[in-house]
Image (cartoon, rainbow, N blue to C red):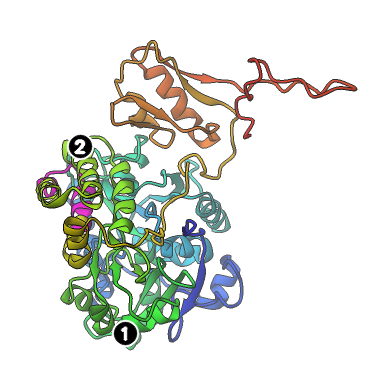
Amino acid sequence: MNAPLPDVPEVRVVGLPQLTQGFDLVERLDLSMHLKVHGPLEPLTGELLAQLAENISLRGRGGAGFPFGKKLRAVAKASIRRGVRPVVVINGSEGEPACRKDTVLLNRAPHLILDGALLAAEALGARTLVVAVTRNSTEISMRAALAERGLSDRRGQQLRARVIRTPERMVSGEASSVIRAANGGPALPPGRRERAAESGVGGAPTLLSNAETYAQLAIGARIGARRYGHTGLDAEPGTVMLTVSGGVARPMVVEVPTGVPLRYVLQLAGAPPLPQGVLTGGYHGNWIDSVAAHDAVVSRESLAAVGGSLGAGAILPIGPETCPLGEALRVANWLAAETAGQCGPCKLGLPAAAGGLSDVLNGGGPAALEALREVTQAVRGRGACKHPDGSARFFMSTLSAFTDDLAAHVLDGGCGRETTGVLPLPGPGYQSAEESIPSGEKLAVDWTLCQGHGLCADIVPELIRLGPDGYPALADASVPMHLRGRAQRAVRRCPALALRIEQPAPQRPARQGGPAALPSGGGRKALGSGR
């Protein structure tokens, strides 16, 4: 089975680089190298910046594709109407295991992202900048980039800038989750939908956009709308960052002009000549067949015309050797586990849908298939966030794209192929594998007291999740230092006093002339020993 994607996979470019300019010179463009490669950037007024965004048809690159100029104007109007300084947020939370393009930019071109965000902050008169990241490498890179510019969260600065860490989860990258995390809460959707442009971080109007979006804005501001439009399609000018993985020889992030044939991008990564399916837009996206993949070009409009989706820029082909429904089941189980557990369609519906797909694969017959269709339809449009809708889209697309395989499983007991696991998913214990400075402490539950209230999972979801029975499941890992405060808060908030933090057991020195002494506990390994 494929290993999880590295933080920074191979990076390629088709045509002339824009976002990836300078990547052939250094691994990371610090401020000095960034200015040598891209040159200085002059500030723009709010109106000119909004016009630029509209002239280059800039849309959000995080999946939703909302027009950036329209969002910028909405924040400006709300700020003026309320008399409140707005906040600018860079959403670098990339919790989907098939996406790495934002991580690549955050790690290798952090100042290009900051350029776009600071342009917007100055145009809006913002005094606060928040950068949300999910990984250790991106946190280190963005903290260093802020320091290189002399930006920090100290009082008295004209612009206060800070980096927040969100867990590597699907729901953590949603705008409402990032805002909730920036406000000091858990990185989970709040359950009510509120426009960030009206009320976001600290209740202020908030401009929140994806990391690539700000980088594209910085490119457009430097070269101008006319030159920007010389690359790519007239209706969708510029380049796009894609993460290509799945059944390919060389997983990579590639910068490609819009309008380039999708088949060329697949060939570049070493995809099968005739894939039985290509998942476009990531795990909230849609499958297309090999004919559609051959005909489509890289653009929102072209992919949508063949039933696909550009989404967050993830492209995942699978070859003929694996069972596509088995691949989909692996993803379905992961999607079900990613639920925030805050609404019925997500907490109950997605596990039921994953179980229904498993029943279909294991010989449940037409009744199992009909039950799967019903539960998937019931999930759509009823969730507190977009995760149920995106997951339902993946389920429905799977059933529509692989009808022959579906018939083989429903009528004949299977397609005869194994599931090779080519679609990337986090490795075992990925929540506990997050790189950070370990505290040595571990969370523990006294099961004689626990009543399944679930407050602990809301406070520190990176370390605690609720199981199917509603009781907490703890990560078997040391509490990272950056989560220590929230872990202590979870302990204090437990109504039944069942949660506690255990200190690491001291290691006894080895005795002279004999075997090392066992830790206390009759041979049980010491807490935090990592063995």
**Which residue of the protein is positioned furthest toward the front in this rendering?**
412
Mark 2 residue type: Leu
- Nearer-N-terminus badge (1/2): 1
Q: Is residue 379 magenta?
A: yes
The residue pinned by badge 2 equals 348
Location of residue 240 by image quarter: bottom left
Q: Which of 203 and 126 is in front in this view?
A: 203
Q: In this view, does 349 lie to the left or right of 28?
A: left
Percent position (x, y) of residue 168? 41, 47
Q: Residues within 10 Å of mark 1 (few under 14, many from 20)?
A: some
For mark 1, what is the residue?
261
Residue drawn at x 61%, y 72% is: 26
Residue 432 can be seen, yes or no? yes
Q: The magenta stretch spans which residues? A: 378-394
Seen in the picture, residue 321 relative to 188 is either above or below; the reply is below
Residue 83 seen from this side: no
Q: Going by the image, does 234 lie left or right of 262? A: left
Does the magenta run of residues contain 206? no
Q: Reply above or below: 474 against 339.
A: above
Contact, mark 1 vs mark 2 (Cβ under 8 Å): no
Rendered position, 193 above or below 278: above
Identity of the residue drawn at 42% across and 65% down:
101
Q: What residue type is labelled 1?
A: Pro
Q: Residue 279 carries which label?
A: none
Q: Which residue is drawn at 46% across and 33% down?
A: 475
Q: Position of residue 526 (x, y in %)?
A: 64, 24
Who is closer to the viewer here, 119 or 58? 58
Circle 2 Cα neighbour tier, 10 Å, few/some/many (<14 / 14–19 / ≥20): some
Secondary structure at badge 1 equals loop
Which of the two residues, 183 or 337, is positioned nearer the viewer here?
A: 337
Residue 161 % position (x, y)? 45, 49
Percent x, y of residue 485:
48, 28
